[in-house]
């Protein structure tokens, strides 16, 4: 790695390291403090502008947890945040800053939809066909996401191209190309809006527990299963050990026989694959077709915050993902049922991310007020 | 510096331009384009206008990165700048803004940007925030609070029609063929930005502050042992970048005449393009200005082509700079990123 | 400087050091790596705060809280890693922080005039390159820029930290000439080095530091290389060389005509032949920086070779990668335990897996058996006396000696055919040193082929069956430790081939003697 981009990564590494090095207690405290502070600011703004803060807070809770449909909505968002969060965590833990999860998510999603649409005529209808198509579609999406992630990984490993810039660029490219695709070549017949065809009815996750069109427990199950698989890979497999060690101390990893270049590419590929799974779940469970990605929602970017909040630990992603899911769900509720503009929630999420990025802030505050005993 | 050195310095920008020209030439021949109907004076004038917000952001961003802090949050600053300018314009004028209100709004917007930039700088430098995440956070905060401001004032994410800035015509100069209308019969913000670009370039290369900024980003230890406070230099650069990006947003607003807060807001990625612009320009304010112009042109190109009757997928054309960056980064290696970007610097005891 | 003491945590880098510099003289500060030379000068230059002692300049006591204070007192330092901004020009670098201005813009003409003035007194040609960027200059030129920079800032006293470390022989000569010119013009110079020859050649006075203490100050004209070598290397503990049977096993590891470049593309290993047999310890002695690091990296698979070959049990392994070599049975105790040997944030359990990722039963079918690794870590800790004996401790919480013992244990437990140990007892406490030495000797008895690289002569003599002395990328000679004195070894390490009586580098015979 050349010195110029190498130092940037060292610095990012160190910052992430500072987060990582914090004990579990500390991490939890920082996460809680960030969210609390952000919400506090949000509530203050709400009050300052003239809305009723109490009503705001109750709406928040209602939106996230008030009733089956709210919970379903929360879980729906959480599923996506968990999956994309894990995608980010995989890469960050290995020291590779994959900011391109959004793009990989989009590529995965469209591939899933299109493969299902194209293959549907070849397979029987009904449950059998449905399950087969779901599996094939998800597989296709996963592989597509993986390929789209491996690309910047290879560019970094073999051409020394700054992975942060390339992944951000690829995000825009994915959004733009897919947006164009759904407008023209792939636009569903007779669709006024730029959408692809819908996938067949029978290709959907069963409605168990929640009778919601946008959420199925299966989706959440996939997300949780992915978390478990990734956790096992990272903690129990040699590949995972090599990857994580590269993230901690590359020189030690090299000493122990790890090929730095190959690790970068495989890490990015794995990260992209998980993002692809997220895209597939989004496509099958929530959307049912594919549309202009710029309207989809910045799951890939929020995932960075989710991952940092969880200190890049796959298991921690679950509560972090649930938190963000709750916030997002509360946001939709607030946007519909109250006067408060939904943008406020976006702003609050932004603040949470900001505070998560500055653990020093809380450490110093803790030191000065004597909280958080072990420092 | 002689030609060979210049070429080496700016290989990325030159490569980018070369690729662009090649593509344009191929397209022109292959599609039988009526070139001169496309590249009209009006088109160039509009390109300059479109380039202005990007250029402002780019200049600020490059100062920050040159000093060692990657301000990836410029998109957020731009959104705040635009939203603040719009709402200020409304509030100051009581609902019926005129030309003078525009200038006041820009000023107010810059002040707000200044405050934001100071806070941001403190988080980045003093509290050693993770630069990437903090910048992204600022983007989200902007995406949230920008339209929020609009909703507060107008009950909608988009503003009603406000007032857009009038062209300024400079008597004799405006009559110069070609150059005249482009530079001297256009929004005064264009000229101001052009001047600013030149000043920024001069300051960076020929003043001691410029030296310090460069050293802070390349080898802060050298600057420290030379007796200069690295931290202060970085603060100044980051604050400058925030203010410039905010100004870029305000200028965007002033030229458009109304605020659009839906989707990605009217800023729509121009902050990111600003970053790409200064990369292409190799951290040189003049180069960044030229790159911004290219992007401005691409922005206006789609409309221009439509008037000539050519339908080109706008979205694909807009992607060209992104693809270009990737190709150039991969083939020609890393941009000349300042060596110490991203590193927090702490003076020794 | 009197009674200077500087501590970093538990480590005493400078222990009550006295040092004085005469005006207009060149004073060399001589010592091995880690002897405290740079620390002492950093204290002088205001980079570090001393724990005890006083500093006076021209009779006046001074305190330096920062380099700025030192500069104001007329002290300039040229660091080993140049404090230059690569992308800026020579002119800009020289005036950085002290720029003359005119109407807000930097007054380059005034700067130019001042610099030319300075250069006119000496034989520099820096003023001819004022508009060249630093990155386009060779290292010798960059160093001259650093010197002019200090002079521009008004330095009377110049400190040069290992100035010849990165220079070619010709550049070194140029530098030494420059230094004499400066001294003649009234400047006082201190230069830090570990090279005896240079110190003798250039300095008027030499102070030797060892392990943080000032051993003594001698007049250059009155001393000899032998005396200096003895002062530098010293005699810590009388290491008795255990008696041994001569080895006569098969050759396990060989290198032939090996040439290796470093990260800067400079050739560091210039045609080395070596061979190690079963049951033998080959010691590679030499001052740090003569190619040992690159040689070891080539043997262990961490660095590609330029030309030549590496053989293992008769097979050519030149192209095999690190992981494969681990599998083949080449264990490696790395030079830098903090960055290579251990992941500092990992517990000892996780560190036990480092290097063992392809070894059953720890990893089978790609999956890790953590309980096996856990047990392994426990075994290593017990057998190799790692303190504190808690495998869930993070590596960084262990002392240097214990970290090293853990690494040694882990590598030995590979049951390798070849063990390469690079500076295995650097920064390690006496007890752990003994322990490690005993283990290595045991391994030798059991038939392992071992290569030990070290700059500690007593260690090399105690452990080795044969000693190859490395100088400037070549094995200048291979000797029998029983029959060679420390002084002779010191001379070889300094490049003097006693057998030939020539200064190495001109016509030194390369290659080791194969037994």
Image: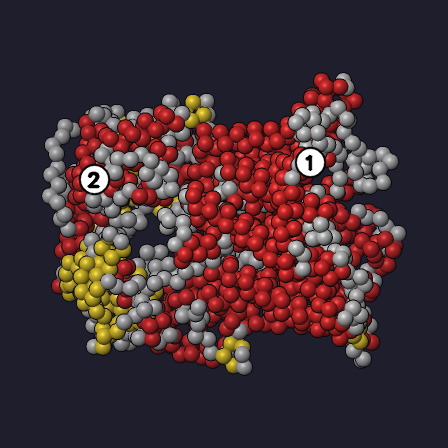
> Which residue does the image show at 61% across and 41% down from the upper left?
A325
- Which residue position is annotated with label 2? C432
Check disc 1: other Cα within 10 Å, few if <14, some if 14-19, many if 20+.
Answer: some
Q: CA distance from mark 1 to mark 2?
A: 66 Å
Location of residue B115 with respect to C338 vertically, above or below: below
Q: Nearer the viewer, residue A211 or A285?
A: A211
Q: Is residue C132 left or right of residue C163?
A: right
Residues indicated by labels 1 and 2 sit on the same polypeptide chain: no
Find residue A197 and report its image quarter: top right
Question: Number of callouts in the render?
Answer: 2
Q: Is residue C367 visible?
A: yes
SS of the residue under disc 1: helix
Give percent across and percent down for residue B3. Answer: 60, 63
Q: Chain of mark 2?
A: C
Tell me the number on the disc at residue C392: none
Residue that lies at the very extreme toward the bottom in this rendered image: C103
> Which residue does the image show at 43% across and 22% down from the upper left?
C364
Q: Is residue A2 visible?
A: no
- Which residue position is annotated with label 1? A69
Q: Nearer the viewer, mark 1 or mark 2?
A: 1
Q: Are marks 1 and 2 in contact (CB under 8 Å)?
A: no
Give percent across and percent down for residue A89. Answer: 53, 40
> Which residue does the image show at 54% across and 73% down from the upper left?
B206
> Which residue does the image show at 54% across and 50% down from the upper left?
A36
Q: Is residue C87 left or right of residue B105?
A: left
Find residue C204 and report its image quarter: bottom left
Find residue C401 and report its image quarter: top left
Q: Is residue B109 left or right of residue A231?
A: right
SS of the residue under disc 2: helix
Give percent across and percent down for residue C15. Answer: 19, 58
Q: Chain of mark 1?
A: A
Location of residue C378 with respect to C394 vertically, above or below: above
């Amino acid at each position: 790695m050349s010195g110029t981009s190498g130092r940037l990564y060292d610095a990012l590494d160190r910052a992430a390291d500072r987060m990582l090095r914090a004990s579990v207690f500390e991490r939890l405290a920082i996460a809680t403090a960030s969210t609390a502070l952000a919400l506090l600011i949000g509530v203050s703004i709400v009050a300052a502008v003239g809305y009723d803060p109490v009503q705001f807070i109750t709406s928040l809770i209602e939106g996230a947890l008030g009733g089956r449909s709210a919970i379903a909505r929360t879980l729906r968002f959480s599923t996506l945040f968990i999956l994309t969060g894990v995608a980010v965590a995989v890469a960050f833990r290995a020291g590779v800053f994959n900011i391109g999860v959004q793009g990989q998510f989009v590529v995965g999603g469209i591939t899933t939809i299109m493969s299902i649409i194209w293959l549907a005529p070849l397979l029987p209808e009904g449950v059998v066909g449905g399950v087969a198509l779901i599996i094939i579609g998800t597989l296709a999406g996963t592989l597509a996401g993986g390929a789209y992630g491996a690309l910047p990984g290879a560019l970094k490993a073999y051409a020394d191209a700054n992975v942060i810039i390339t992944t951000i660029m690829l995000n825009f490219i994915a959004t733009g190309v897919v947006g164009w695709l759904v407008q023209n070549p792939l636009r569903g017949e007779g669709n006024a809006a730029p959408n692809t065809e819908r996938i067949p009815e029978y290709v959907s996750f069963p409605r168990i527990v929640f009778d919601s069109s946008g959420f199925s427990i299966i989706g959440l199950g996939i997300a949780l299963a992915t978390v478990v698989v990734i956790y096992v890979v990272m903690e129990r497999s040699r590949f995972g050990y090599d990857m994580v060690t590269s993230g901690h101390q590359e020189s030690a990893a090299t000493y122990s026989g790890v090929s730095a270049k190959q690790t970068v590419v495989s890490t990015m590929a794995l990260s992209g694959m998980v993002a692809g799974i997220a895209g597939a779940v989004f496509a099958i469970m929530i959307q049912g077709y594919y549309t202009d990605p710029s309207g989809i929602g910045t799951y890939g970017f929020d995932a960075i915050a989710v991952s940092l909040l969880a200190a890049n630990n796959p298991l921690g992603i679950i509560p972090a993902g649930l938190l963000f899911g709750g916030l997002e769900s509360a946001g939709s509720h607030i946007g519909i049922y109250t006067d408060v503009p939904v943008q406020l929630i976006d702003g609050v999420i932004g603040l949470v991310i900001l505070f998560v990025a500055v653990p020093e802030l809380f450490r110093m505050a803790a030191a000065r007020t004597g909280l958080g005993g072990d420092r | 510096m002689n030609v060979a050195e210049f070429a080496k310095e700016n290989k990325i920008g030159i490569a980018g331009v070369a690729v662009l020209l090649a593509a344009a030439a191929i397209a022109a021949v292959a599609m039988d384009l009526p070139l001169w109907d496309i590249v009209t004076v009006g088109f160039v004038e509009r390109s300059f206008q479109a380039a202005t917000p990007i250029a402002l952001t780019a200049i600020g961003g490059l100062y920050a990165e040159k000093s060692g802090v990657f301000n990836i949050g410029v998109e957020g600053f731009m959104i705040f700048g635009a939203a603040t300018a719009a709402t200020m314009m409304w509030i100051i004028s009581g609902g019926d803004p005129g030309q003078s209100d525009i200038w006041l709004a820009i000023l107010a917007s810059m002040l707000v940007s200044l405050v934001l930039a100071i806070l941001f700088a403190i988080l980045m430098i003093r509290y050693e925030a993770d630069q990437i995440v903090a910048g992204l956070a600022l983007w989200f905060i902007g995406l949230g609070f920008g339209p929020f401001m609009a909703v507060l004032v107008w009950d909608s994410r988009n503003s009603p029609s406000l007032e857009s800035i009038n062209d300024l015509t400079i008597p004799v100069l405006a009559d110069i063929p070609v150059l005249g209308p482009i530079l001297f019969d256009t929004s005064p913000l264009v000229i101001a930005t052009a001047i600013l670009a030149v000043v920024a370039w001069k300051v960076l290369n020929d003043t001691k502050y410029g030296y310090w900024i460069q050293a802070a980003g390349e080898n802060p230890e050298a600057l420290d042992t030379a007796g200069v406070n690295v931290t202060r230099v970085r603060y100044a650069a980051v604050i400058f970048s925030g203010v410039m990006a905010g100004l870029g947003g305000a200028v965007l607003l002033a030229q458009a005449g109304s605020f659009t807060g839906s989707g990605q807001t009217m800023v729509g990625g121009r902050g990111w393009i600003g970053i790409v612009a200064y990369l292409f320009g190799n951290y040189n304010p003049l180069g960044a200005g030229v790159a911004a112009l290219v992007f401005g042109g691409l922005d206006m190109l789609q409309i221009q082509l439509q008037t000539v009757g050519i339908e080109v997928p706008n979205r694909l054309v807009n992607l060209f700079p992104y693809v270009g960056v990737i190709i150039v980064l991969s083939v020609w290696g890393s941009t000349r990123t300042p060596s110490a970007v991203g590193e927090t610097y702490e003076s020794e005891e | 400087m009197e009674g200077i003491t500087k501590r970093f945590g538990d480590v005493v880098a400078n222990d009550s050091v006295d040092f004085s510099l005469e005006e207009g003289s060149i004073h060399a500060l001589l010592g091995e790596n880690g002897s405290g030379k740079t620390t002492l000068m950093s204290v002088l230059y205001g980079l570090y705060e001393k724990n005890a002692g006083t500093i006076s300049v021209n009779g006046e006591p001074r305190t330096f809280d920062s380099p700025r204070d030192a500069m104001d007192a007329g002290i300039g330092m040229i660091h080993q890693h140049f404090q230059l901004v690569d992308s800026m020009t020579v002119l800009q670098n020289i005036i950085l922080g002290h720029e003359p201005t005119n109407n807000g813009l930097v007054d380059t003409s005034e700067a130019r005039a001042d610099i030319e003035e300075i250069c006119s007194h000496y034989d520099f040609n820096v003023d001819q390159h004022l508009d060249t960027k630093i990155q386009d200059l060779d290292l010798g030129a960059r160093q001259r820029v650093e010197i002019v920079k200090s002079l521009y800032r008004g330095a009377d006293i110049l400190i040069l930290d290992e100035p010849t470390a990165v220079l070619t022989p010709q550049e070194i000569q140029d530098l030494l000439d420059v230094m004499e010119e400066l001294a003649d013009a009234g400047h006082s110079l201190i230069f830090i080095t570990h090279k005896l020859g240079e110190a003798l050649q250039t300095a008027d006075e030499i102070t030797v530091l060892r392990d943080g203490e000032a051993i003594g100050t001698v007049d250059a004209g009155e001393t000899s290389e032998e005396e200096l070598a003895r002062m530098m290397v010293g005699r810590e503990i009388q290491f008795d060389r255990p008696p041994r049977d001569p080895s006569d096993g098969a050759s396990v590891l060989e290198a032939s005509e090996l040439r290796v470049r470093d990260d800067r593309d400079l050739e560091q290993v210039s045609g080395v032949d070596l061979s190690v047999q079963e049951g033998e310890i080959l010691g590679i002695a030499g001052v740090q920086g003569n190619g040992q690091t690159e040689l070891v990296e080539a043997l262990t698979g961490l660095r590609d070779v330029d030309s030549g070959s590496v053989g293992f049990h008769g097979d050519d392994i030149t192209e095999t990668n690190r992981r494969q070599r681990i599998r083949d049975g080449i264990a490696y105790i790395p030079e830098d335990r903090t960055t290579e040997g251990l992941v500092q944030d990992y517990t000892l359990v996780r560190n036990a897996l480092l290097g063992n990722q392809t070894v059953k039963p720890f990893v089978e079918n790609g999956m890790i058996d953590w309980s096996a690794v856990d047990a392994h870590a426990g075994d290593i800790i017990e057998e190799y006396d790692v303190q504190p004996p808690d495998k869930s401790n993070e590596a960084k919480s262990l002392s240097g000696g214990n970290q090293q013992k853990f690494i040694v244990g882990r590598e030995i437990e590979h049951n390798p055919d070849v063990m390469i140990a690079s500076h295995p007892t650097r920064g390690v406490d006496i007890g752990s040193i003994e322990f490690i030495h005993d283990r290595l000797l045991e391994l030798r008895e059991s038939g392992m082929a071992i290569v030990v690289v070290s700059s500690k002569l007593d260690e090399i003599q105690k452990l080795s069956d044969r000693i190859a002395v490395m100088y400037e990328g070549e094995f200048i000679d291979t000797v029998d430790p029983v029959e060679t004195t420390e002084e002779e070894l010191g001379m070889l390490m300094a490049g003097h081939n006693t057998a030939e009586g020539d200064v190495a580098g001109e016509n030194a015979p390369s290659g080791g003697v194969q037994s």
